[in-house]
Amino acid sequence: MTKLDSVVRAQARIQTPLGPMTAAATARGLAGLWFDGQRHHPGPLAVPMDAHDPFIAQARRELAAWFASAAARRRGFAVALDPQGTEFQRGVWQLLLRIGSGGRSCYGELARRLGHPQAARAVGAAVGRNPISIIVPCHRVLGQDGSLTGYAGGLPRKRALLELEGARDEVAEPAGHPMAAAA
């Protein structure tokens, strides 16, 4: 049993164009949305499967609309969120929610916005531990030079999410990446 098991009341599987995800909800909102094989995935949860949980059902509907429609991507998500983390992590995740569809930021900029300009690495660690993929848009955080940097769900998914949002033309590939030579 994990710490997450003590606060999560329901979980369910959600199919997306980028692969299956596990959603988890507390009594207050969506606590997790992880791709299969994602880094920092909590693993099997010891809580009931309940696809009808209101937060999970809402997340499923909103994700389906988000993948299907540019208007829905611009509108964003309304499902209540209850991510579990430290105060610092939750502060970083709140900043991620302010990056609009098609927008981008970098770790240093997020650290400056938090009032801790020297904390870019700590911000990067918090971004990497974001438990609510897509909805809390950590995929919109790039390297200082605009390059694709780590994404717990994998760089191909990050690239696909950015392309879906129309930001791809302005994103540089990391040095040494096969796509960098084509750019």
Image (cartoon, rainbow, N blue to C red):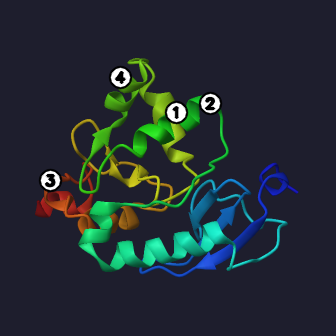
Disc 3 and disc 2: Cα gap in Å? 32 Å
Q: Amino acid at mark 4?
A: Arg
Precedes in sequence: disc 3 or disc 2? 2
- Asked if marks 1 and 3 touch (Cβ < 8 Å), the reply is no
Residue under pointer 2: 87
Residue under the image location 77 percent in, 77 percent down: 49
Residue at which label 4 appears = 112
Q: Are marks 1 and 2 in contact (CB under 8 Å)?
A: yes
C-alpha gap between disc 4 and disc 3: 22 Å
Marks 1 and 3 sit apart, C-alpha to C-alpha, by: 27 Å
Q: Is residue 84 above or below residue 31?
A: above
Q: Read off the residue under disc 3.
A: 170
**Closer mark to the observer between disc 4 and disc 3:** 4
Residue that lies at the very extreme toward the right in this rendered image: 1
Tell how many labels.
Answer: 4
Q: CA distance from mark 2 to mark 4?
A: 17 Å
